[in-house]
Amino acid sequence: MFSLPVNYQTPHSGYHWDGSSRRFFEGWYYRVTLPDCGQTFAFMYSIEDPIGGKPYSGGAAQILGPDDQYLCRTFPDVDKFWASRDVLALGHWGKTNLNTQPLYLLPKEFEQHIQEGYQATATINQGIIRDPATGFYCRWLYEIQPVYAWGNQNSPQQSTAGWLSFLQIFEPGWQILMAHGLASGWIDWNGKIYQFTNAPAYCEKNWGGAFPQKWFWLNCNCFDGEPDLALTAGGGRRGVLWWMESVAMIGVHYQGKFYEFVPWNSQVQWQIQPWGRWQMQAKNLNYEVELTGTTHLLGTPLRAPTTNGLEFCCRDTMQGKLNLELRKVSDKPSQIILKSQSSLCGLEIGGGSWDNSWHSS
């Protein structure tokens, strides 16, 4: 269940906690987009201070569902959390009739024994959570066929933060685990059942002992008339050793090729409104990209790890509009490789000081 082709697994797929008592969190994000009904489900799993006994020790599962509706359940018992250090595989048990050490279960066993909890790998996402106050629930089980990880197809995959991320000098770390995949299965959203085959899927993670002061994010792998296209872009103010820096990147996978725009190979610029409009431009020696994300929706507040535990500190919509243009500039005149749009783009802002727009480069 956990095995993948050698060229598919990304760096940082495994669990990062080193067993120490220092402040630590790790979070995972799974998304599946249903183009037939224009909806998205985003599953967010997190663990904080897994050594236990700390003020913020515990885990959570959050879901951003149809029409940006929100469901959350916390799992305070860190001993019921498990994760692999070598591959993407994790889970957290809540209510269960098992007294054993938590571990991966076959889907039928999970359904039989886990009344509340989740488990996820590179090829499966399964769980059930319920709001005890309202009884509102979500159950899900889908399999994932990876298409793009983070890099060119059939090549060793890259670290999203570059080779320096192996030195643990960036806080937090960020890794796109699967830029694009195909999901098949079902989601039961409080009695409404969504069944899907080969729906666009996505997965990323972050981890560390510190938290970004401010960030933004765009993600889409469901474009009009372009089934083989995936975009992830974002930026933030993060800690590097003893100083803070503002950084941003854009990654595009298209027709087997990875177009990477990062601070060490490109000029990256951004103009992000406090809410409603995300604009980015990037250029390197061979290519340039422009993207604009917009929304008229209010978005939904989500929880994220902070120095004071899991708090509402970011806002998302999964139904943003996106325009993307990619050009080859090493040819004269420049040549348009790709021009595409979507109405199912994930858009996010997070952290503090969003009173004004954020312009930087």
Image (cartoon, rainbow, N blue to C red):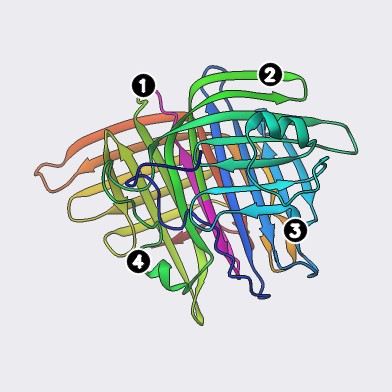
Mark closer to the chain start, 3 or 1:
3
- Report crowding for label 2: few under 14, some 14 to 19, many 20 or more residues within 10 A (C-alpha): few
Q: Quadrant of residue 42?
A: top right
Q: Is 214 inside the magenta-drawn segment?
A: yes
Rendered image: mark on residue 163: 4
The x and y percentages for residue 254 are 30, 36
Residue picked out by circle 1: 225
- How far apart are the alpha carbons under marks 4 and 1? 35 Å
- How far apart are the alpha carbons under marks 4 and 2? 43 Å
Q: From the viewer's perspective, is the residue at label 4 or at label 3 nearer? A: 3
Classify mark 1: helix, strand or loop: loop
Q: Nearer the viewer, residue 191 or 244?
A: 191
Residue picked out by circle 3: 78
The x and y percentages for residue 157 are 33, 51
Residue picked out by circle 2: 193
Q: From the viewer's perspective, is the residue at label 2 or at label 3 nearer? A: 3
Q: Is 189 inside the magenta-drawn segment?
A: no
Mark closer to the chain start, 2 or 1:
2
Residue at the image position 22 percent from the left and 48 percent from the top: 287
Q: From the viewer's perspective, is the residue at label 4 or at label 1 nearer? A: 4
Amino acid type shown at disc 2: Ile
> Extreme right residue here?
133
Q: What quarter of the picture does the C terminus occupy?
A: bottom left
- Report crowding for label 4: few under 14, some 14 to 19, many 20 or more residues within 10 A (C-alpha): few
Badge 3 vs badge 1, beta-carbon distance below 8 Å: no
- How far apart are the alpha carbons under marks 4 and 3? 31 Å
Amino acid type shown at disc 3: Val
Magenta region? 205-225
Residue at the image position 35 percent from the left and 26 percent from the top: 226
